[in-house]
Amino acid sequence: MVDGAQGAELVVPRSRPVMSRGAVSDDVLHSLRDEVRAFLRTELADGAFRPDVDSWMTGFDPDFSRRLGERGWLGLTMPVEYGGQGRTAVERFVVTEELLAHGAPVAAHWIADRQMAPSILANGTETQKRRYIPGISSGTVFFAIGMSEPDAGSDLASVRTRATDNGDTWILRGTKVWTTGAHLAHAMVLLARTDGTTGDRQQGLSQFVVDLPHPDIEIRPLASIDGEAHFNEVIFHDAVVDSSALLGVRGQGWRQVMSELAFERSGPERYLSTLPLLRAWTGLLREHGATPEQRQTLGELTAQAWALRQMSSQVARELHAGGEPDVLAAMVKDLGSTFEGDLVSAIRNASGAIPRRTGGTDFERLLAQSVLHTPAFTLRGGTNEILRGIVARGLGMR
């Protein structure tokens, strides 16, 4: 662990690199990591942002996203012909890992870059690919996810939002909830029922790319426990969209969503949301010294984070190879989100610090953020109970 001014850095030993596979050399990956770190240090020194916990959910800064796009760090895995960089999932892993570790404000572009661009690339029409992917890659087009509903959260197959085929248009009616960033998004990928009834479960679901804002789509901010409003309730009042809004194949929405969720559940954000807190605490221990008990806590947390990193990087390698690591992705999300909460409790107990939203040190501020955000860690992206069911099915146990 180094860099006492900003806390601990992720240590990536050159003698035993994690992200070495395929055509990307270890030197290229290390050079990319160094480049991203240098950029982030400059941004911090210039006061462009301050590190925050859970920054991929709450840190909306369109200008920062645009600067990342200008450096070619968004749309990394997208083909050059659609405005992407034509690079690999392991290179994207390196970039996102550093952004998260530094608590950078990446929420504006996060959903679009993480899963909407790959989903549109895999399922979209040529027109959709050329319309949306270049903007996502430049950090100027942001997306929201229209999945969860008031009565269909983790039980996603019971969605009631209906898309009615009206020939050259679709009419959308229903409500989505916990829709991160919808109030700032340029578009949403919506899961809706086009055929059958809710009793048909996974059958008859389709996806749509819906441009925002829309005159018949109402977006209501939902305040979280910390008073911030990055979640939304989104109500479709018979909203009319063109027939070209259909994403992929009618009735294949469930299959498309399951492939998409591998991107959502497996990334480093599933265990690094609270790493800025760990870095800040490590910086304090370096400066003031640590008790044997604190050193043990730090060692245990570091070891757990490193193990989760190995799992998440394996998902990146499998995605790069064209696989569908949905079971491993579910394991990363289950174990990672549990770890994030355990990290907060361990540091709070070991430090004896009092969380302070205002008027305290940066460490106390990060601790307060962490305490307030912890309840959501094991809920978003699918509850841990649902995820364990996915793992059990993958192992042939149910």
Image: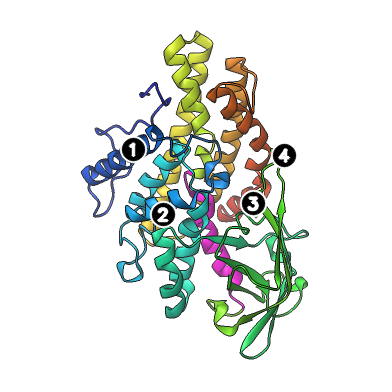
Image coordinates of residue 251 in percent, x first then y, are 62, 78
For the residues marked 4 and 1, what is the alpha-carbon distance in whole angstroms? 32 Å
Residue closer to the observer: 360 or 326:
360
- Mark sitting on residue 66: 2
- Mark sitting on residue 37: 1
Mark before the other along the chain sequence, 4 or 1: 1
What secondary structure is found at the residue carrying circle 2?
A: helix
Give the residue type that dot 2 points to: Arg
Residue, disc 3: 382
- CB-based contact (under 8 Å), mark 2 and mark 3: no
Residue 394 visible, this angle = yes
What secondary structure is found at the residue carrying circle 4?
A: loop
Mark before the other along the chain sequence, 4 or 2: 2
Q: Is residue 128 above or below residue 220?
A: below
Please tell me whether mark 4 or mark 3 is closer to you in this view.
4
The picture quadrant where one finds residue 2 is top left
Say few, some or many: other residues with alpha carbon within 10 Å of mark 1 (under 14 / 14 to 19 / 20 or more). some
**Point 44% across, 20% down: residue:** 283
Q: Is residue 321 left or right of residue 155?
A: left
Q: Which residues are magenta?
A: 251-268
Give the residue type that dot 3 points to: Gly
